[in-house]
Amino acid sequence: MTLVVDADDRKGPAAARRPVFAALDLGTNNCRLLIARAIPGGFRVIDAFSRIVRLGEGLSRSERLSERAMERALDALRICGAKIERRGVTAVRAVATEACRRARNCGSFVDAVERETGIAIEIISSQEEGRLAIAGCASLLDPAIPYALVFDIGGGSTELMWLEVAPGRRPRLIDQISVRCGVIGLAERYGGDHIPPARYRAMVEEVAEHIGPFAARNAITERHAGGRVQLLGTSGTVTTLAGVHLGLPRYDRRAVDGRFLGLSDARSIIESLVTLDFAGRAGHPCIGPERADLVVAGCAVLEAICDCCPVDRLRIADRGLREGILVDLIGADQV
């Protein structure tokens, strides 16, 4: 899949006649939008939007979306709705994930979104969330390595997909799990400022307990020992670590997407981040104050995953669910 980012959508008669597709992902932490046109073998992004809304803030305690969280999300979705209208989108799919799956009041929230923004939100299953993530980042998998562990560390849950990979074929999903170990819930339980080493290890162990049976039934550790497993991560946690590793003065998707990060380098960065307090992490340009209380929780999830699949390096995907939606929409249009 070719993904070209070009906000300057050169306007002209031919461009005006081509269909325009929009993919919106309302997650537990972020609201993200991509608008694109199809090009041979992929798509060209003509507009995008991303904002941290923390829709799932407090959800682990109340099982409800708070008024403040819903208003933050609505503010972001109003911007998305305006972009969708301005770009003349011809096909759109807007999905919501773990926060809306769990919240008892998600129905009234989804109704309010459609009433106020014109966007019809679809609450998707964890299985569909995983399928879309794979569709969005599958082109980064190495067909010469027969197995892949693909993961997405979200705000409310973490998705893990175990795939069989072969040259000339689409990756085949063998097994999948969704665990309620997302960065917002973990940070609310374990803290987001200064986290002592013992508390951080407890967080890693909690995540490991959830993913252990999945790793065991797929013999991931044993297959890794034979050099037959690759690791691909798509989430804010892994893209942040890549940005820190590269020493970027500000986050740059083009420098991060598709890059390999050695696990020893990742663990070294994690060790340094865990020793910092909120202010110390917030001062890094690739983290900032909006992620400073969440990044350590994401690191704990990543460490637990790497412990069960200790490959030499991790491939970073700054793509996933939204790109998977676009692949689906463009494929359906071409059919």
Image (cartoon, helix red, strand yellow):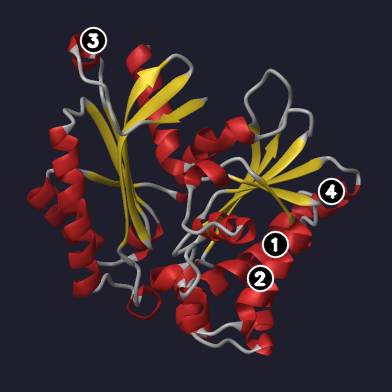
Q: How crowded is mark 1: few (under 14 residues within 10 Å), some or many (20 or more)?
A: many
Rounded to the nearest whole Å, what is the CA distance between mark 3 and mark 4? 49 Å
Q: Residue at x 48, y 72 (%)?
A: 294
Return the residue at label 3: 14
Q: Please tell me which of labels 3 and 4 falls first in the chain.
A: 3
Q: Please tell me which of labels 1 and 4 falls first in the chain.
A: 4
Q: Where in the figure is residue 2, as x and y percent of width and height? A: 50, 25
Return the residue at label 4: 224
Rounded to the nearest whole Å, what is the CA distance between mark 2 and mark 3? 49 Å
Return the residue at label 2: 270
At numbered mark 1, what does the secondary structure look like: helix, strand or loop?
helix
Q: Please tell me which of labels 2 and 3 falls first in the chain.
A: 3
Cβ–Cβ under 8 Å for marks 1 and 2: yes
Rounded to the nearest whole Å, what is the CA distance between mark 3 and mark 1? 46 Å
At numbered mark 2, what does the secondary structure look like: helix, strand or loop?
helix
Q: Is residue 28 above or below residue 151?
A: below
Q: Residue at x 59, y 30 (%)?
A: 139
Rounded to the nearest whole Å, what is the CA distance between mark 1 and mark 2? 6 Å
Q: Mark 4 belongs to which amino acid?
A: His
Rounded to the nearest whole Å, what is the CA distance between mark 1 and mark 4? 18 Å
Q: Where in the figure is residue 41, as x and y percent of width and height? A: 48, 17
Q: Where in the figure is residue 126, as x and y percent of width and height? A: 47, 50
